[in-house]
Image: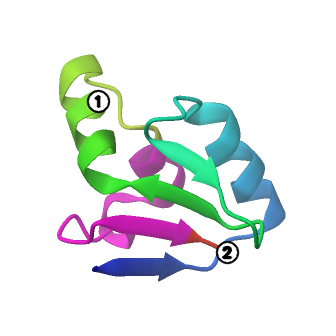
């Protein structure tokens, strides 16, 4: 499993939770980390043509070859 861990501030955490609400894409694990399924996210963004994580974090912050992004 290929995971990209990204450290974020609490303000960014709130923005991510507000921007991505689909539970098939994003969930909070038992440690309180936000986990994003990359395949589900990219499928959704291709369909909606909205890129909320890129808008918040910038395009260079995300590794699209990862299976999951973990924000902590």
Q: Residues within 10 Å of mark 2 (few under 14, many from 20)?
A: some
Q: Residue furthest top?
A: 48
In the image, taking residue 32 as reference, residue 51 lies left or right, namely left
Q: Which residue is mark 1?
A: 44
Mark 2: secondary structure: loop
Estimate the x, y position of residue 40 in percent, counting from the top left: 30, 41
Asked which quadrant contains residue 71, the reply is bottom right
Q: Residue at x 54, y 60 (%)?
A: 35
Camera-side residue of 60 and 17: 17
Above or below: residue 70 compared with residue 37: below
| Residue 50 located within the stretch drawn in magenta | no
Q: Who comes first in sequence, dot 2 or dot 1?
A: 1
Camera-side residue of 54 and 44: 44
Q: Which residue is mark 2?
A: 72
Q: Which residues are magenta?
A: 53-70
Mark number displayed over residue 56: none
């Amino acid at each position: 499993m290929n995971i990209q861990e990204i450290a974020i501030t609490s303000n960014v955490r709130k923005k991510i939770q507000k921007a991505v609400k689909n539970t098939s894409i994003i969930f909070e694990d038992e440690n309180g980390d936000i986990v994003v399924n990359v395949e589900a996210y990219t499928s959704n963004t291709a369909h909606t043509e909205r890129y909320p994580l890129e808008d918040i974090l910038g395009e260079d912050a995300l590794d699209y070859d990862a299976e999951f992004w973990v924000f902590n």
